[in-house]
Amino acid sequence: MAGGLLSGLAVAPPDILVSADRRMLAVATQAGVLTERSSGGSRLTRESWLRNWGEQEATMIPKEGAAAEGAVLCTALSCEIRPHPDGPSAILLRQPPRDTARPRRGPALPPPSVLAETGCGKAAVMLSLEPIRGWCRETPRVDRFSVWRDGAHAVWLARDGALIRSDRQARGERPWVPPVPTPRVQPQAEPFAETE
């Protein structure tokens, strides 16, 4: 029985969690837990994360400035997150503000894209609650599409980089695990045959 009670000490909780509905992200620092929520983020998910980390409350990640005793440094477009002072950082990429006002009538313009170049090569992992557009081979990403394909994500930041684990990785290939979703429009492998 003592082994069971002590087993919790052998497992390190993740530093960063991203919810399965991609509406919330939380960071555990030595100064407390900080969250980034979009509209409709689940209060139940937030409470279970806080219980997992042994915390009572969480504060929001600031729009700009520092938080959690300097563990989080934010600008309008990104936040550098360093949960451990001697460890690597993650970068949270945010949607840029709109340059133009919304039209009074007609369809709204699409929001500006979150660009990979904003955080490429600057941290051990790039995070965003929106899709990250663009290529960056040197820095792994957890964004809206990662969560769509593989479910919730957990990130551990260690001295040798980031360990990213998704819900799909944890559950594996089993009959009850849904297949990887595919986009609705698929490029054609071969062109259609010409008709005469």
Image: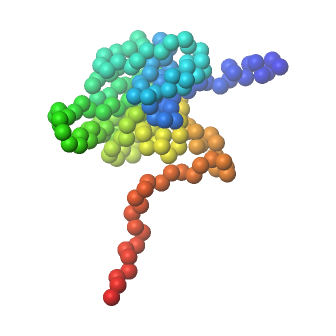
One can see residue 92 in this view? yes
Q: Residue at x 42, y 39 (%)?
A: 144
Q: Quadrant of the N terminus?
A: top right
Question: For the view shown, which residue lies furthest in the right direction?
Answer: 1
Residue 79 x %, y %? 35, 25
Q: Residue at x 29, y 23 (%)?
A: 75
* Coloration mode: rainbow
Q: Is residue 2 left or right of residue 27?
A: right
Q: Which residue is more in the foreground, 53 or 9?
A: 53
Residue 147 x %, y %? 48, 40
Residue 33 x %, y %? 48, 17
Question: For the view shown, which residue lies furthest in the bottom direction?
Answer: 196
Residue 175 x %, y %? 67, 51
Q: Residue at x 34, y 47 (%)?
A: 135
Q: Quadrant of the C terminus?
A: bottom left
Q: Is residue 85 left or right of residue 103?
A: right
- Tally of marks: 0
One can see residue 86 in this view? no
Residue 38, quarter of picture? top left
Q: Which residue is more in the foreground, 49 or 125?
A: 49
Q: Which residue is more in the foreground, 180 or 29?
A: 180
Q: Residue at x 37, y 25 (%)?
A: 80
Q: Which residue is more in the foreground, 94 or 111?
A: 111
Q: Is residue 66 left or right of residue 51?
A: left
Q: Is residue 186 above or below residue 32?
A: below
